[in-house]
């Protein structure tokens, strides 16, 4: 069934994929359940955790009717997010990584922008970053995209999964996360998305991101191998203009060189 044809029971669906993050997960979940906008459902997708995450969440779930927990064998974050997308009943889908959290007015402010910009189907917010508990200033290179974000997204992710809010119909158009990508699955999706859709930045730091831990996917080596694969996939399948094709090919070659130099 196309994602957009599911009857929308609420305005937002918030999807949290998780794997063995019991302590941090509770903080992420609480940040959603405490939102000032109450027109949402929360879906936690347990991707085969072995740390009793499910048992602890089940006790909390009994207190909230808009809280669902899905369990699956360990298949990776892309598959976990896709399971949440396919189960979601909201019109607008938000994602939150299990080591991040929302500010209490995240959904309220996002809704106000959705109502102001009725022709936009992809929104994202600014963020606050912490590493090992200390505030981490962001560099200019990490500036969030606003408007046509395809070209800026080639070099690095200009959208964070924990900051984004996407109309459900977008996934019928571009497809879901590519489950063959164990890392950089967000980079690959953002390329397909920004090629077709403009994005609107909500210039308020409504998402708090935690970093500096070895269990994060972004801490893995060889990331540029998968970025190059994402760009190669785009060259093979996407309707690119000549200018876009040149830029994608050039960026692919750069990513390949970075990866090969690292191997050497």
Image (cartoon, grey):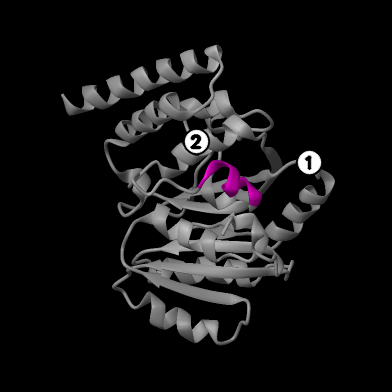
Number of residue marks: 2
Q: Which residues are magenta?
A: 169-175
- Binning the other alpha carbons within 10 Å of mark 1 as few (below 14), some (14 to 19) or many (20 upward) gives few
Q: Is residue 61 visible?
A: yes
Q: Is residue 237 magenta?
A: no
Which label was assigned to residue 149? none
Confirm or deny contact between disc 1 and disc 2 (CB under 8 A).
Answer: no
At a point 46% along the width and 43% down the height, the residue shown is 186
State the image quarter where residue 17 is shown: bottom left
Relative placement, left or right, of 87 versus 103 is left
Q: Is residue 174 magenta?
A: yes
Q: Residue 222 or 48: which is nearer the viewer?
A: 48
**Outermost residue to the front:** 1
Identify the element where label 1 is drawn: loop
State the image quarter where residue 118 is shown: top right
Q: Is residue 167 visible?
A: no
Residue 133's spot in the image, x, y percent?
45, 55
Q: Which residue is mark 2?
A: 157
State the image quarter where residue 117 is shown: top right
Q: Residue 40 or 134: which is nearer the viewer?
A: 40
Quadrant of the rendering where the N terminus is positioned? bottom right
217 vs 67: above or below: above
Relative placement, left or right, of 190 versus 123 is left
Identify the element where label 2 is drawn: loop
Residue 50's spot in the image, x, y percent?
29, 73
- Binning the other alpha carbons within 10 Å of mark 2 as few (below 14), some (14 to 19) or many (20 upward) gives many
Quadrant of the rendering where the C terminus is positioned? top left
173 vs 3: above or below: above
Q: CA distance from mark 1 to mark 2?
A: 23 Å
Q: Which residue is mark 1?
A: 119
């Amino acid at each position: 069934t196309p994602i957009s044809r599911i009857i929308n029971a609420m305005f937002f669906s918030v999807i949290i994929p998780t794997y063995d993050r019991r302590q941090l997960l509770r903080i992420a979940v609480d940040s959603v359940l405490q939102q000032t906008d109450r027109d949402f459902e929360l879906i936690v997708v347990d991707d085969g955790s072995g740390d009793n995450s499910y048992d602890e969440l089940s006790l909390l779930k009994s207190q909230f009717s808009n809280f669902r927990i899905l369990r699956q064998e360990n298949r990776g974050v892309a598959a976990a997010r896709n399971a949440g997308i396919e189960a979601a009943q909201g019109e607008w889908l938000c994602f939150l990584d299990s080591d991040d959290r929302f500010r209490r007015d995240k959904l309220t402010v996002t809704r106000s922008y959705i109502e102001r910009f009725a022709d936009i189907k992809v929104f994202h917010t600014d963020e606050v970053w912490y590493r090992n508990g200390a505030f981490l200033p962001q560099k200019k290179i990490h500036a969030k995209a606003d408007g046509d974000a395809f070209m800026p997204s080639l070099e690095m992710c200009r959208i964070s999964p924990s900051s984004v809010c996407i109309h459900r119909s977008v996934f019928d158009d571009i497809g879901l996360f590519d489950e063959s990508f164990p890392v950089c699955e967000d980079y690959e999706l953002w390329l397909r998305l920004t090629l077709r859709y403009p994005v609107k930045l909500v210039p308020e730091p409504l998402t708090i991101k935690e970093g500096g831990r070895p269990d994060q996917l972004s801490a893995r080596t060889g990331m540029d191998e998968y970025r190059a694969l994402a760009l190669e996939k785009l060259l093979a399948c996407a309707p690119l203009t000549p200018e876009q094709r040149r830029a994608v090919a050039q960026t692919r070659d750069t990513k390949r060189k970075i990866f090969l130099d690292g191997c050497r």
